[in-house]
DNA sequence: AAGCCGGGGGG
DNA sequence: CCCCCAGGCTT
């Protein structure tokens, strides 16, 4: 049996029952594909269910406020996905009359939809012969065909896409694409792949050359940037506090946080009070104290955020304070959400 | 071509 | 501690 036949056969016997496998509705497939970008299936499932319930149709998502969408997305990370999701829902509703386009090219033009996602929707929903190439596919092809081109080099990306297109089963593309990804996720895993019981073992180059552990090849790793965050948490006499929305570039765009003083290194309380003049309403606080003696190090894939939360008692009650009990309504990064949990009302 | 963008799970 | 996850956008 050839490669695609083996994949299809394996998929038929081993596929998981997942919520988005009960439909070919482009809206739901699109929703699942955006959520699963750089995200494990297990982590995405509860979010998918939440979104389908809150927004059964693309028009429902288009009508929502971005803040509401971000709130539902909270904790899933890569928040540009949520912002693009919302923007695309509006485009589909207003310019495509609520109906997803059925061509690869039109799908690719949508915000947040790249080659992988356009191929996935085109093949799963419209049965178009477009090969998906995600992290699973890179790994499976690299091992099975013994390809040592770096998967994140220009040549590698091009070569793997061509190879994937060459070996795909166009007649069963819908199941073949899902099959090769499922095979990578469950059988041909990054660590400890189950080669002993693998139906592709006989024809797998990496297995026969004992190079499963060294494939796929990936170029370098990114360096971690260290940042020092000091959050100023006002709590006035009415138990009200203050949030700000992050704007511009960088992490957590459009999410909320407490007023932030970012510094080049850890600071003392004296350094902090010197800066309070720049924060409206916090100029002459009656008290400032450190909430967490032990610094919190919040780890992102490319940044470590060394974080301290300072409780600031303003000299006057806040003009437009937010009751602490209402903080849960705002979309915030996990770092902030975890802190809010520790606040006693 | 390289950097940036989250959070979580597993070894 | 490391790696990787149903990638895409920006520079």
Image (spheres, coloured by chain):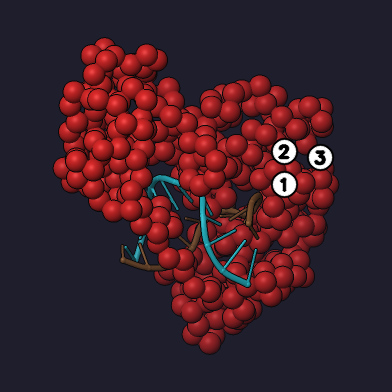
Chain colours: A red, B cyan, C brown
Q: For the residue carrying disc 3, how many other residues have a C-alpha within 10 Å: few (<14), some (14-19), or many (20+)?
A: some
Q: Position of residue A4 (x, y in %)?
A: 70, 66
Q: Indicate which label's residue lies in the foreground, 3 or 2.
A: 3
Q: Secondary structure at mark 1?
A: helix
Q: Secondary structure at mark 3?
A: loop
Q: CA distance from mark 3 to mark 2?
A: 9 Å
Q: Position of residue B2 (x, y in %)?
A: 56, 69
Seen at 43% across and 22% down, the residue is A329
Seen at 46% across and 66% down, the residue is A222
What is the chain letter for disc 1? A
Q: Determine whether, in the image, residue B2 is placed left or right of residue A5.
A: left
Above or below, A141 relative to B10:
below
As drawn, the label of residue A121 is 1
Q: For the residue carrying disc 2, how many other residues have a C-alpha within 10 Å: few (<14), some (14-19), or many (20+)?
A: some
Q: Determine whether, in the image, residue A279 is placed left or right of residue A220.
A: left
Q: Indicate which label's residue lies in the foreground, 1 or 3.
A: 3
Do the residues under discs 2 and 1 have CB atoms within 8 angstroms?
Answer: yes
Q: Which residue is labeled 3 in the image?
A: A101
The C terminus of chain A - image quarter = top left
Seen at 25% across and 51% down, the residue is A266
As drawn, the label of residue A26 is 2
- The tag earlier along the polypeptide, 2 or 1, is 2
What is the chain letter for disc 2? A
């Amino acid at each position: 049996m050839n490669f695609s036949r083996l994949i299809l056969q394996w998929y038929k016997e081993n596929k998981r029952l997942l919520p988005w496998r009960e439909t070919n509705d482009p809206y739901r497939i699109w929703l699942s594909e955006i959520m699963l970008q750089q995200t494990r299936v297990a982590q995405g499932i509860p979010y998918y269910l939440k979104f389908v319930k809150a927004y059964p149709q693309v028009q429902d998502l288009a009508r929502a406020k971005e803040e509401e969408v971000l709130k539902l997305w909270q904790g899933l990370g890569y928040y540009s996905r949520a912002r693009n999701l919302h923007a695309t829902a509006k485009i589909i509703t207003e310019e495509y009359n609520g109906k997803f386009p059925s061509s690869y090219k039109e799908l690719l033009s949508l915000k947040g939809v790249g080659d992988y996602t356009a191929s996935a929707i085109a093949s799963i929903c419209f049965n178009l012969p477009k090969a998906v190439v995600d992290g699973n596919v890179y790994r499976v092809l690299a091992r099975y065909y013994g390809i040592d081109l770096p998967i994140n080099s220009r040549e590698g990306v091009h070569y793997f896409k061509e190879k994937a297109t060459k070996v795909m089963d166009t007649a069963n593309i819908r199941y073949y694409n899902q099959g090769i990804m499922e095979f990578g996720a469950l059988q041909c895993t990054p660590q400890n792949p189950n080669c002993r019981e693998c139906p592709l073992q006989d024809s797998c180059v990496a297995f026969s050359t004992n190079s499963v552990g060294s494939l796929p090849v990936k170029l370098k790793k990114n360096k971690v940037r260290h940042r020092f965050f000091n959050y100023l948490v006002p709590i006035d006499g009415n138990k009200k506090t203050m949030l700000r929305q992050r704007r511009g570039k960088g992490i957590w765009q459009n999410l909320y946080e407490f007023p932030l003083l970012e510094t080049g290194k850890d600071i003392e309380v004296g350094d902090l009070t010197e800066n309070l003049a720049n924060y409206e309403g916090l100029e002459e606080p009656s008290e400032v104290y450190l909430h967490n003696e032990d610094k919190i190090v919040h780890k992102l894939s490319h940044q470590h955020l060394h974080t301290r939360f300072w409780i600031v008692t303003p000299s006057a009650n806040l003009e437009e304070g937010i009751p602490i009990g209402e903080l849960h309504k705002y979309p915030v990064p996990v770092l902030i959400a975890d802190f809010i949990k520790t606040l006693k009302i």
